[in-house]
Image: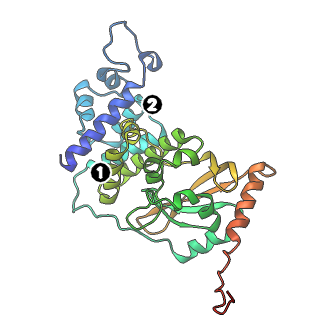
């Protein structure tokens, strides 16, 4: 299957999946007892979007190239897409347009030194920078200590030895002990990768990662087939840390442009002031700041 066929399949499955989630009652349409689909019919979406049934059927089959933004916006409203899902649909349409030149392959971009200085200056929050593939490409000491099980996992390492959240979630059984809400984190992880695949359809490394995870992990295959999309990951995270125990942390994700083409994500994990988690996070920070003892050589003339 070529890239164009793959892309049409992505569009078809995404639109059909969103259509199946909306009932006629929810959309304000007449209902009947004889329905063969769980959600809306194609002709019903066409009515809601103000287009012909033939036109929408062609669109759902993946023929999205040349469709105007106004029409895409109407379809997004008819399917009640979230802001992230709407962005994903527009990304799919952009990727389907005929390219005037061969698509460029994304090059990995390292964070500049000033970004690492900023991370190092953050002492009471775990901070790290990740790219769209969910590789951790920079971090502060507490960020490394907080996610020590992932950093120490061989299964989580990408081709360059950097920890990858998706690999850790689905390839390392220990992730189920570390992430208290493993299912929620796994769902968000796949949704982030799905959004990145829409933004960067020609990223060979990303496609290889998705292919590997789909081959090895049944959980990943199930979640990938749901076509859920998420652009940012933020909220509350519960971790069972091997050194300090249970942690309840809030986390925030911020865009961090590092070049004209690459936008990475700056992630911060903090604890509620005065909470037990704050005390444990402070303990972890002190442990991370304490240098490992330097082994001393024993005297060679020790008496036996």
Residue placed at 34% from the left, 46% from the top? 216
Position of residue 116 relative to residue 57, above or below, is: below
Whether residue 270 sits left or right of residue 206 in the image: it is right
**Badge 1 or badge 2: first in the primary sequence:** 2
Q: Which mark is residue 238?
A: none
Location of the C terminus by quadrant is: bottom right
Q: Which residue is mark 1?
A: 95
Residue in the foreground of this view, choosing between 303 and 184: 303
Q: Position of residue 105 (x, y in %)?
A: 30, 64
Marks 1 and 2, Cα distance to the nearest angstrom? 22 Å
Residue placed at 26% from the left, 39% from the top? 9
Residue in the foreground of this view, choosing between 244 and 22: 244
Residue in the foreground of this view, choosing between 286 and 132: 286
Q: Position of residue 137 (x, y in %)?
A: 49, 66
Q: Which residue is mark 2?
A: 80
Residue in the foreground of this view, choosing between 68 and 170: 170
Name the secondary structure under disc 2. loop
Farthest front residue in view: 304
Looking at the picture, the colour scheme in use is: rainbow
Q: Crowding at label 2, few (<14), some or many (≥20) Cα neighbours within 10 Å?
A: some
The tally of labels here is 2
């Amino acid at each position: 299957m070529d890239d164009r066929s793959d892309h049409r399949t992505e569009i078809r499955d995404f639109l059909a999946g969103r259509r199946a989630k909306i009932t006629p009652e929810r959309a304000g349409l007449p209902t009947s007892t004889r329905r063969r689909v769980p959600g809306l019919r194609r002709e019903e979406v066409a009515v809601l979007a103000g287009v012909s049934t033939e036109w929408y059927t062609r669109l759902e089959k993946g023929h999205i190239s040349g469709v105007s933004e106004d029409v895409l916006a109407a379809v997004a409203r008819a399917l009640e897409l979230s802001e992230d899902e709407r962005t994903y649909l527009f990304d799919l349409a952009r990727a389907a347009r005929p390219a005037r030149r061969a698509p460029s392959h994304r090059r990995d971009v390292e964070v500049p030194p000033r970004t690492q200085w900023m991370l190092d200056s953050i002492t009471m929050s775990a901070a790290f920078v990740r790219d769209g593939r969910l590789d951790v490409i920079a971090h502060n000491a507490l960020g490394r200590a907080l996610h020590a099980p992932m950093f120490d996992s061989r299964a989580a390492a990408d081709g360059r030895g950097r920890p990858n959240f998706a690999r850790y979630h689905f390839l390392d059984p220990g992730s189920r002990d570390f992430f208290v809400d493993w299912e929620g984190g796994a769902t968000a992880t796949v949704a982030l990768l799905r959004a990145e695949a829409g933004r960067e359809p020609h990223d060979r490394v990303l496609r290889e990662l998705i292919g590997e995870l789909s081959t090895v992990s049944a959980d990943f295959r199930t979640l990938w087939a749901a076509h859920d999309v998420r652009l940012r990951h933020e909220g509350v995270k519960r971790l069972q840390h091997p050194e300090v125990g249970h942690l309840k942390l809030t986390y925030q994700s911020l865009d961090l442009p590092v070049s004209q083409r690459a936008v990475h994500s700056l992630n911060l994990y903090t604890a509620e002031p005065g909470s037990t988690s704050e005390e444990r996070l402070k303990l972890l920070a002190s442990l991370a700041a304490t240098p490992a003892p330097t082994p001393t050589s024993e005297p060679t003339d020790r008496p036996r």
